[in-house]
Image: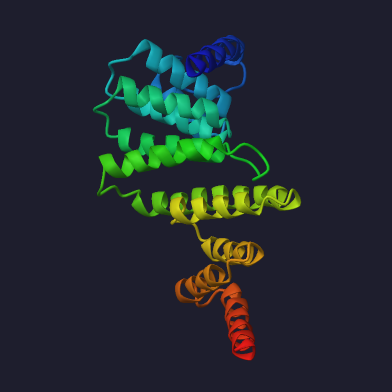
Amino acid sequence: MKHRLIRLVSLWLLAGLAAGLAVLAGCGTGNPYPPGSYERAVFFADKGKNLEAVSSFESFVRRNPTDSLASEAQFRKAMTYMKMKEYPLAAVEFQILRKDYPTSSRVEEALYQEGMAYLKQVGRVERDISGAYQARTHFQNLLQQYPDTSFRPQVEQALVEISDLIVAKRLKEINVYRQLGRYQAVATTLDNLLAEEQESSLLDKVLWERAQVAFRLGEQEQGRGFLQQLVQRYPDSPLADKARGRLRSGAAADSTRS
């Protein structure tokens, strides 16, 4: 329902825009192609006239839904929204392409681009990152449906980015738990990240933080275990050097006590 409403609003706005553009059509646009044609929309797109392009692609698809170029026009309309950074509208248009033209050669790319549209909606880590979860679902579906997809390198990189966003968000949240003295909640949050965000490039930091909270909770052996994991899994991380130093000082302290 939400997506339907977004599309209706966008179409309503475009209808008003199209009317205005029609008035201008004979006095300065310089587009040599007739209204409603695919070529007219491409001309506007190539000239960087994004609003006119969106309106023209919409007009072509509406008038020629079974034309061999209809799915391409739908795809280019969605990509024009991506260029305009209108990511929610772009996501809806990619969904329409996959629904209305399921045999199109653009379906695979539309699934990828829809995931990117969700991901690009995510701002700073202080903001809501639900779009990152939506993007991950789409990318996982893409890899399941098209295991040999040519987009695999981009998808895998995007999955790392998504995991990093989630980890960064959670690491900021545990600062609140620390201020409240809720160290067991800190430990649980970090354990969940280690279990669920294996693709993140920030797991060295998660292991370091998990070791520190273990020491804080008096779990010395467990803390050393997390430091050892950090050293073994991320030997080139700057935090690995700190972990080695902490392990050496801990070993020295143990030998002194014995």
Residue 34 can be seen, yes or no:
no
Q: How many marks?
A: 0
Horizontal relation, residue 99 to residue 196: left or right: left
Q: Quadrant of residue 37?
A: top left
The answer, for residue 52, to whether it is visible in the render is yes
| Residue in view at x 45 percent, y 23 percent | 40
Image x and y of residue 45, in percent: 50, 31
Colour mapping used in the image:
rainbow
**Which residue is painted at 46% across and 24% down in the image?**
92
- Foreground of the two, 139 or 225: 225
In this view, the residue in front, 185 or 78, is 185
Residue visible at 54% across and 32% down? 87
Residue at x 31% of width, y 37% of height: 108
Residue 96 locus on image (x, y percent): 39, 22
In this view, the residue farthest toward the right is 179
Residue 14 horizontal side relative to residue 138, left or right? right
Q: Position of residue 126 (x, y in %)?
A: 68, 43
Q: Quadrant of residue 49?
A: top right
Q: Is residue 179 above or below residue 235?
A: above
Nearer to us in this view, 74 or 146:
146
Query: Which quarter of the image is occupied by the C terminus?
Result: bottom right
